[in-house]
Amino acid sequence: MITLAHADPEGTITGGGDLELNASGNIETVSDLESARQRVVQHLRWWRNEWFLNFPEGVPYRSEVLTRPISTALASAIIADEIRKVPDVLDVKNIEASINPQTRTMDWRANISTRFGETFVEVGI
């Protein structure tokens, strides 16, 4: 599997997402640990029922994660299960969730273990 490099300087899903080009103008690719990290971030970007060609694909944000009252423990467990579905991910070492009512956002930070080593992922919705 080839993973294209994307500009994401903060390591979050809000970091841009543009394709990276090398000095020759060719599209960069990533492998191993960075590839696994990017696939986790990309997987967590998909909302279930969003893509008309595969409605079951994606994270069930609307139906399970963002229900009222919001439970950070339940939401974190669902996100951890979704992370484990990504190829090359072995386990989620720890996951923290925080809710900001003023901005109506929820953020997760997790250390994940992949077959290439450990990495840190931060996502927000």
Image (cartoon, grey):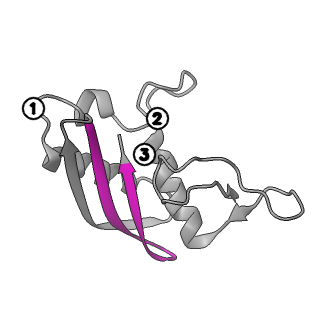
Quarter of the image for the C terminus: give it.
top left
Residue at position x 56%, y 56% in the image: 8
Residue extending farthest to the bottom is 117
Q: Secondary structure at mark 3?
A: helix
The kind of residue on which mark 2 rests is Glu
Q: Looking at the picture, does residue 16 appear above or below residue 46?
A: below
Query: Magenta residues, as a range?
Result: 105-123
* Label 1, label 2: how far apart the Cα atoms are: 25 Å
Query: Are the two marked residues, 2 and 3, in contact with CB atoms closer than 8 angstroms?
Result: no
Query: Does the magenta run of residues contain 116?
Result: yes
* Label 2, label 3: how far apart the Cα atoms are: 11 Å
Residue designated by label 3: 44
Would you call the spot at circle 1 few (<14 residues within 10 Å), some (14-19), or many (20 or more)? few
Q: Any mark on residue 69, and which?
A: 1
Residue designated by label 2: 57
> Which quarter of the picture shows residue 28?
bottom right
